[in-house]
Amino acid sequence: GALRPVLLASLVGLLGGCPCMVTPAIPGQKSIEFVEWHQDSLHTPLCDSLQNARVYKGEIMPGQETLFHRHKHDTLYITLDDGGGADLLNEVWKEGEGLQPPIRAEIKTGVPFLMQHENQHLIHRISSAIANK
């Protein structure tokens, strides 16, 4: 069948920031460059006129990956595709620990989930499994 994108719609807090770099506290671990979530080309703003929230679409095709990017605000995610969900790999950079091994995330269509980033910002990269077709 045809390859299908994974669509995520999210409500997030206010925009801000610039390209940045983080250096882990672990000797031998390399630093990574990252952007704010809205600077990643796979995150498309849908509505940015709300006072305390932004709505965006994250669309990732099988085999694609985002840039490393940061989320600083609590985010409500909902997968909107019609294929029953998605199989994603999440690579997280943790302060003081560096880059973590990729974690498989199975996202179900229409099931919202909240990730709280206000107190601990999330810097990560998402890739879509080739099996998302």
Image (cartoon, helix red, strand yellow):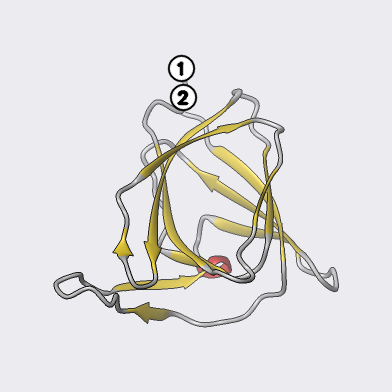
Vertical relation: 127 (above or below) 133: below
Instruction: Give the percent coordinates (x, y) of residue 100.
Output: 32, 55
SS for dot 2:
loop
Residue occupying image coordinates x 71% and y 40%: 112
**84 relative to 128 in the view: left or right:** right
**Looking at the image, is mark 2 or mark 1 nearer the viewer?**
2
Which image quadrant is residue 132 in? top left
Q: Which residue is mark 1?
A: 1
Are the two marked residues, 2 and 1, in contact with CB atoms closer than 8 angstroms?
Answer: yes
Seen as rendered, the residue at the extreme top is 1
Q: Residue flagged by tag 2: what amino acid is it?
A: Lys
Q: Residue at x 40, y 25 (%)?
A: 131
Is residue 44 placed above or below 1 in the rendered structure?
below
Residue 24 % position (x, y): 29, 75
In the displayed structure, 79 sits above or below 11; it is above
Q: Which residue is mark 2?
A: 133
98 and 63: which one is in front?
A: 98
User: What kind of element bears circle 1?
Assistant: loop
How many marks on residues? 2
Mark with earlier residue (2, 1):
1
